[in-house]
Amino acid sequence: MIGRLSRSISGSLSFVSLLDIRLYIVVFTQSATQMFTTLKHDASELMTVMTDLIVKAAVRDELEDKNISADFFGSLNGEVEELLEDAARRAAANDRKTVQPRDL
């Protein structure tokens, strides 16, 4: 019988079989998979919240002769988000579901 001696929590020696080790590995793998799935789900929710409303390449093309700071795109995205929210509120205030250029 293949196995090894290991110390249990109480300090006494116990015999751990290869089958027990495999069981521990399966349980650990399932726990790790559940944690990864949870983290992946949380990350996808975060990415949904942080969706870019702008196309960075198009902005770079438009500002081709300018340097662009690292936080510029985040600020621009925030401004566009506010602009869209204001336009949607104005359309709703006028009892419309369609956002029109005049809402800007």
Image (spheres, rainbow, N blue to C red):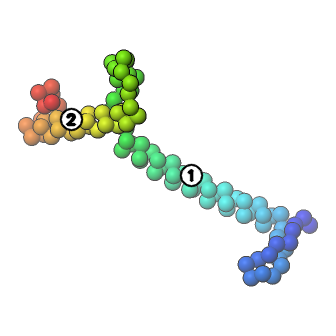
The answer to which of marks 2 and 1 sits earlier in the sequence is: 1
Q: Please determine whether, in this image, residue 43 is positioned above or below residue 55.
A: below
Q: In the picture, which quadrant includes the N terminus?
A: bottom right
Residue 79, image quadrant = top left
Q: Which residue is mark 1?
A: 36
Q: Please determine whether, in this image, residue 27 is positioned above or below residue 67.
A: below
Secondary structure at numbered mark 2: helix
Q: Residue at x 41, y 47 (%)?
A: 45
Q: Which residue is mark 2?
A: 83
Q: Nearer the viewer, residue 6 or 67?
A: 67
Residue 80 visible within the image: yes
Q: Position of residue 76 (x, y in %)?
A: 30, 33
Q: Nearer the viewer, residue 76 or 21?
A: 76
Q: In the picture, which quadrant includes the C terminus?
A: top left
For residue 81, side relative to residue 60 (left or right): left
Q: Residue at x 81, y 82 (%)?
A: 12
Secondary structure at numbered mark 1: helix
Q: Is there CB contact under 8 Å for labels 2 and 1?
A: no
Q: Residue at x 23, y 39 (%)?
A: 82
Q: Residue furthest right?
A: 1
Mark nearer the viewer, 2 or 1: 2
Q: Position of residue 41 (x, y in %)?
A: 47, 49
For residue 14, side relative to residue 70 (left or right): right
Classify 10 Å Cα crowding around label 2: few (below 14), some (14-19), many (20 and above).
some
Q: Position of residue 69 (x, y in %)?
A: 38, 31
Q: Please state which amino acid type lies under the numbered disc 2.
A: Leu
For residue 81, side relative to residue 4 (left or right): left
Residue 103, image quadrant = top left
Q: Please state which amino acid type lies under the numbered disc 1.
A: Phe
The span from disc 2 to disc 1 (Cα, nearest Å) is 36 Å
Q: Residue at x 83, y 79 (%)?
A: 13
